[in-house]
Amino acid sequence: MISNRLRNLGITTCIDGDSSNAAGNQAAVRCSVRKFLGKLAYVFLLSTLAWSGVGAQNDAASLQGQVVDEDGHPVARVEVTARWGVNSTLTVFTDAAGKFQIPQLPAGRIQLSLSKADFFRIENSPVDLKPGANDSSFTLNHETEIQQKVEVRSDPAQIDPATTSHQETLVEHDIVNTPVPASHDLQQSLITIPNVVQDQSGAIHVAGARQGQTEILLDGFEINDPANGTFTPRLNVDAVQAATVESGGYGAQYAHAGAGVLTLDTKTGDDKWRFGTTNFIPGFSLQDGVHFGNWFPRVTFSGPIKKGRAWFSGAVSAQHSFDVVPQLPSGQNISTLWSGDSLLRMQVKITPRNILQASFLYNRLSAPETGLGPFTPLPTTTDSESGRYFVSAKDQIWMGRTLVSIGAAVDEGWNNLTPQGNATYVVTPDTASGNYFQTSMEHAHRLQFVGDVMTDTYHLWGSHTFSAGWNADSLTLFQQAARGQIDYEREDGTLADQATFFGPNAFHLSNTQLGAYAQDQWRPTHQLIFSAGVRADWDRLAGHILGEPRLAMNWVPIGDGRMKFTVAWGEHYQPLNLSIVGQALDQQRMDVFYDSTGTTPVGNPEITTFTLPAGHLGQARSQNTNLEWNAKIFQRTYVGAAFLFRDGRDGYAWELESTGTFLLQNDREDRYIAGEVWVKHSFGNDREIAVDYTRSHATSSQVLDPTLASLVFNSQESGPEVWDAPNRLISHGWTPLPWWKLLVSYFFDWHSGFPYSAITDQQQLFGVANSFRYPNYLSLNIGLEKQFYFHKHEWAVRVSSDNITGHNNPDVVVNNVDAPNFGTFSGTAGRAFTVRIRLITQN
């Protein structure tokens, strides 16, 4: 067999014959010559193969490059796929600095494709490689509607081997296409994200957490309410480029993310002039007469200040809400609201390696009938006036292979509440009367400084990307309140409890927060990625430094990156909100309880005081564990499953002492456990569908949150949080129809009813805290949109049906067991139809 193979190579063999005669001697000589020639040919062949190998090695090429957006910002997590030959491909992702490296490519022409959600895709761009190292740069353009007919969108999902966090992103066309009840309200769009739930009061919760436990970033700066950490900013939804929620496995760069991160990226201008407007025609209502109805006009505009050097963008919106409460008498059943917001951004490319950006956000709101509802008639409402402005600036500088960012922001907000009159406020088991008891003024301020350093990828036993940074925040809160009397009456009209307030009614409070982090992402092999980081945070009110390690690992078992397993764990710091501490500096409350006749006091008055402990409080924190599996099956289908466990420790809660004093302690334990499965499929450039199911529990060892205005005279109890939704199924999608080029879209949301507590007319719990539940929530919204040209402009008109099934989704309940209508639900929105008219952005 060996001889045959050598013969095929032109190498012959021989067998020694008999050399005892002349013929044998001649045969032996011939054989020896053939052996020599064969060995010579064999050496020549090996030399040729070796030289050809060297030549092939010399023809090998590598490609390194950077991906930036249209304004020169580096774009991270871009999927870069190289194709050559018949079926040869290799996929990598850009790092935090937008850099990528592809080794071991053949010299010659290859095809590159670049993709990331929210950007138009670059498909099969030819690149000619010379032997050795090659450098290149690419520009990805953000999606804009006017271009969608000639550009290709990226896939709605991707499996990035370097991403360790559990995250969901809404990009511009998600926000525009998904029909939500109030398309002008960004929070309504956020509830289409599986890990975001909106409770009965309208507040949103990320991954079962309290509002203040989610860090909200606007273009890189924290924009949580400086006083209480809630989500209060308003901005034109058409200005939002992307909204990303991270609920587990996120890195050490986030300063105040005890349970999650919400990142809002707004649009910047470019070298093209653009203008768009939505809902510019006022609405009218025929409910209870003819009225100026709901109107939510929005305008966006952007363009160059100097082409290729400086750009601006602006977004302005206004809101006029008109609501009718049918349970109240005519003439006293209408509430209105006026609000407006303005966002202005500017960006200057000082040099190709230095970009300066600044922004200004202004909010103003006037709501003269705040609180109107089925059980709170018009005289009990308040006039609410609030405003806010937010100014930020950030400079990004490339220093060699390192990206340095420094920035500062000022956040100022105020809120004033004024009752409708001076009548005594009366609360009965099922309703209220009189005028609200409190006039208040609140002013909150935050000054923040941030700095970050990100290195290019470097190699040491694999590849590394290192980042570090710091933050410093100064916060202040001023509050002043004048409080009257509250009468709690029984159903028969007799007085059960009378509350009055005394003591200083104004306070000023401040705090300082400092933090720093460092983390490294190490990829020792193509299949494994490790991320390790640590934070250190200090809070002046808590008086402690907290160290927070973060660890994560990704395993990519398949070479083409179509599958990923993630394991992540981290400890996260939760700052102490000023509004919590402020309760200890506020007034005291005195409750006098009466007998069944309502005329004779029973026992001594109950004095309620909120106090702080003698020493420093501990530092609240949580430990988050995230397990996740992602896979891409077929061409455009993504499936996955995730498990999230958050163990909150040393949380702050008011505990009722035997003396009637509420003492602030930090021994609350909040726990959230969730399992999630999903499937997403893209049918092409303009067809998508997503389905997600989550099974979860959000519980706490201390669920009561007493305030001066809302007291429950009970010790703390454990139970589910009021936003706990054990089962949730959501789905959304859109597709064009073959008739009249209509676009049909839908959003389906079903979840378990939220829990609530029952109380008595003595302001005490009845049964176990949060042991009752609202009915299950179900809503199906369907929209039909038609795009057309009119007067050389492109327009779009969408007609939507919200809650098309008419399912009863109440948001108010009579929770007093002494009321004859205890357990009565109200406040359902019912079925509604809305119309949206848009002038699609022109350029």
Image: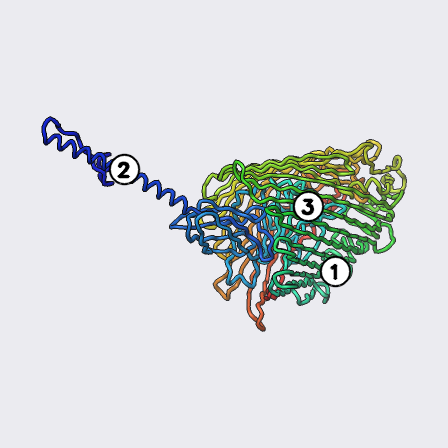
Residue 309 falls in image quadrant: bottom right
Specify which label sits upstream in the sequence, 1 or 2. 2
* Dot in front, 2 or 3: 2
Inspect this view and state whether residue 832 appears: yes
Specify which label sits upstream in the sequence, 3 or 1. 1
- SS assignment at label 2: helix
From the top left corner, tell me how far across and down residue 652 is, in percent.
74, 37
Q: Work out how far the residue at label 2 is from the one at label 3, CA to CA, in angstroms.
A: 65 Å
Whether residue 323 sits left or right of residue 530 in the image: it is: right
Whether residue 488 sits left or right of residue 256 in the image: it is: right
**Residue for point 83% across, 34% down:** 660
* Dot in front, 3 or 1: 3
Pick whichever, 171 or 708, lies toward us: 171
**Residue for point 13% across, 33% down:** 26
Tag of residue 42: 2
From the viewer's perspective, is residue 226 above or below residue 33?
below
Residue at label 1? 338
Residue 140 falls in image quadrant: bottom right
* Dot in front, 1 or 2: 2
The crowd level at tag 2 (other Cα within 10 Å; few <14, some 14-19, many 20+) is some
Residue at label 3? 451
**Residue for point 39% across, 49% down:** 87
- SS assignment at label 3: strand
Residue flagged by tag 1: what amino acid is it? Trp
Residue flagged by tag 3: what amino acid is it? Gly
Residue flagged by tag 2: what amino acid is it? Tyr
